[in-house]
Structure formats: C-alpha cells, structure tokens
Image (cartoon, helix red, strand yellow):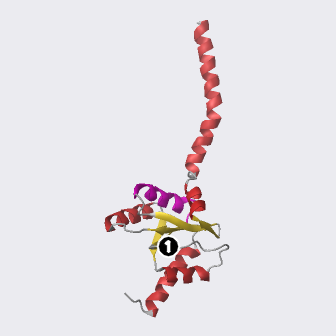
Amino acid sequence: MAINKIKKKEIIAKVSGALKGATSAVFVNFHKMPVSETTTMRKALRAQGVGYTVAKKTLLKRALSEKKFSGEIPELAGEIAVAYGKGDDITLPAREVYVFQKKSEGRVTIVGGIFESVYKTREEMTEIASIPSREVLLARFVNVINSPIQRFVIGLNQIAEKRA
C-alpha cells in the first residue's frame, strides 16, 4: 500500500526523533512473526524502557542519513524494525532483543545496530547483547571479592572445630 508524502514525513520524523535521544539502537528483522508474539515482545521491551518502531527500509535509511553516525549502515534485509534505548544502560536494547531472538526460533534476528554513534554489524551487536547488565557485573565483582574472605573464614572455622 502506498504511503502519501505527509505520512512518509511523519514516519521519518518519528524515527529521527527516536534515534535523536537514543543511547543505542538495534536493527531487528522480524520475518514471519505472529501478531501475538510481536505484541508480547513490544510489551516486554516497553516495560524495560526500550522503544520499538517499524518503518519501511527506504524511510529508515532517510532518517539514518539525517544523523551523522560513523561507519557503514549494515545490510537491512527483510522486514526491519528499530529497538532503541534512552536510558543509562546502553546495552539494554541489544540484550532485550537478543532474549527474544533466542526464544523465537529464527523469527526475530539482530541485523545490526548503532552503538556509541557507530554502525555495528550483526556479529558486533550480538557480542554487545551478551554483555551482562551493570547489576549483574557488580554482583559478580562482589562475589569475586567475597570468595577469598569466605574461604578464609571457613578455614578458621575448621581450625576452631579441630581445637575444640
């Protein structure tokens, strides 16, 4: 179905506005995804503070050309959407889409993205998606610090039990 010029300008403005304040964005291919799964994914992304916009590739490329990101735009094959985040956690959009990529059996895939104002390939965005959240990293760090202390206390406890 053809879209008139006014509607096209609105879509370009919407995508540009979404990318303007975004800390990172992920290009998502959602081929043959049922409406129920799409709705579930949108709700889950929204709950995490991640925006999700679908646009025609030509309009998306126009919106991206207005922005001055470095690198080369990855190949946008298939039906494309943009997941973007505006919070402090710049890996959140990639991580949340990656969760659905694992669940969807190939219906949702990461195609590429924008990270720190640089276009990234599918492989690079998948690596970024595998980075744990800040809270998880802090918990792991505390565990690493706590582990030697805990072993020392267990050793002291065993010595005390032997003497008693």
Helix or strand or loop: what does disc 1 sit on? loop
151 with respect to 42 (left or right): right
Vertical relation: 101 (above or below) 79 = above
Q: Residue at x 52, y 79 (%)?
A: 60
Q: Nearer the viewer, residue 36 or 151?
A: 36
Residue named by callout 1:
77
Q: Is residue 121 left or right of residue 14?
A: right
- Picture coordinates of residue 36, whole percent (x, y): 32, 65
Query: Picture quarter containing residue 25?
Result: bottom right
At label 1, the amino acid type is Ala
Q: Which quarter of the figure is the C terminus placed in?
A: top right
The residue most toward the bottom is 5
Residue 122, image x and y in percent? 56, 64
Residue 68 image offset from top left, x and y in percent: 65, 78
Look at 48% across and 68% down and name the residue there: 28
Task: Give the camera-side residue of 52 and 105.
Answer: 105
Whether residue 141 appears in magenta in the rendering, the answer is no
Residue 25 seen in the current view: no
Q: Quadrant of the N terminus?
A: bottom left
Q: Is residue 96 magenta?
A: yes
- Magenta-drawn segment: 85-104
Q: Position of residue 76 (x, y in %)?
A: 52, 73
Give the main secondary structure, helix, strand or loop, of the magenta stretch: helix
Q: Residue at x 44, y 88 (%)?
A: 7
Q: Quadrant of residue 156?
A: top right
